[in-house]
Image (tube, rainbow, N blue to C red):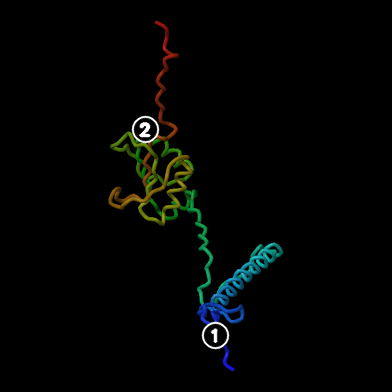
Amino acid sequence: MARTRDRFDAIAREPGRVGSHRGPIRRGGGWIGLLLFLIGLVVITAAGLFVVDRIVRDTSPTGQGLDFAFPFLPKPTDAATPEPTEAPVVTNDPNEAVARGVRIMIMNGTPVVGLQNTVGDELVGVGWPIATRAAAGDRQVLDTIIYYVDPANADLARGLAEAIGIGEARPIAPNVYPGQDLIIVLGNDHPAVPRPEPAPTDSEQPAG
């Protein structure tokens, strides 16, 4: 016997999910889950390495942590340590100047008349071989300089600066003072040069 159709047989089937176990699977759902898993794994690994590094750093006698260098990356090199510079050699023994046969000249670049002779006599008295003494054309030289022609005699120039008590050793071309090996140019920084009196202030002016 045939079944009689009623109004419920005319209801159209609705698209979409029909029950939780029959819904369509979303595309890409597996990749999203894998990506979230990998992100979580990286975060957990980094946190674990950080904790271990702190523990190793605190317990290590050198205070160094873990070495996370990768074999395919270049290892960091330590910063270059500057080599200590050697102090310049100073030879203040006049016998060494005599042994080398150096010729020493004194030039007076100050307004003090005869200062080249005063300093020259002092140096000769302790054994320095002074060959020439003269007044410089410029009598307003600021600083005392001991020039050396040959760099091998730079140590003697520094020794002369110590013997005089003032001055700086500097190189010079051989054609400036021909025939001389060491040239002392006395400047106005020498203690024998009088210092100008300071100008009186308003409070020091005599009452009129």
> In the rendered view of the protein, which quadrant contains the C terminus?
top left
**Image location of residue 43, percent across then percent down:** 60, 69
**The one of 100 and 58 positioned closer to us in this rendering:** 58
Where residue 141 is drawn, which disc sits there? Answer: none
First along the sequence among labels 2 and 1:
1
Amino acid type, residue under disc 1 in the picture: Arg
Please state if 5 lies on the left or on the right of 198 as rendered. right
Q: For residue 20, which quarter of the picture?
A: bottom right
Which corner quadrant of the image does residue 106 belong to? top left
The secondary structure type at the circle numbered 1 is loop
Q: Nearer the viewer, residue 25 or 38?
A: 25
Image position of 54 with respect to 100: above or below: below
Classify mark 2: residues with Cα within 10 Å, few (<14), some (14-19) or many (20+): some
Instruction: Give coordinates of residue 73: x percent, y percent.
Output: 51, 74
Vertical relation: 151 (above or below) 161: below
Residue 151 at least partly seen: yes
- Outermost residue to the right: 59
Q: CA distance from mark 2 to mark 1?
A: 144 Å
Identify the image quadrant of the N terminus.
bottom right
Q: Secondary structure at mark 2?
A: loop
Question: Is residue 28 visible from the viewing direction of this image?
Answer: no
Whether residues under marks 2 and 1 lie with C-beta atoms below 8 angstroms apart, the answer is no
In the picture as drawn, the residue positioned furthest to the bottom comes out as 1
Would residue 100 appear left or right of 15 to someone viewing this image?
left
Q: Which mark is residue 5?
A: 1
Amino acid at circle 2:
Gly
Residue wearing tag 2: 114
Residue plotted at (45% across, 38% down): 122
Residue at the location (43% across, 31% down)?
Answer: 192
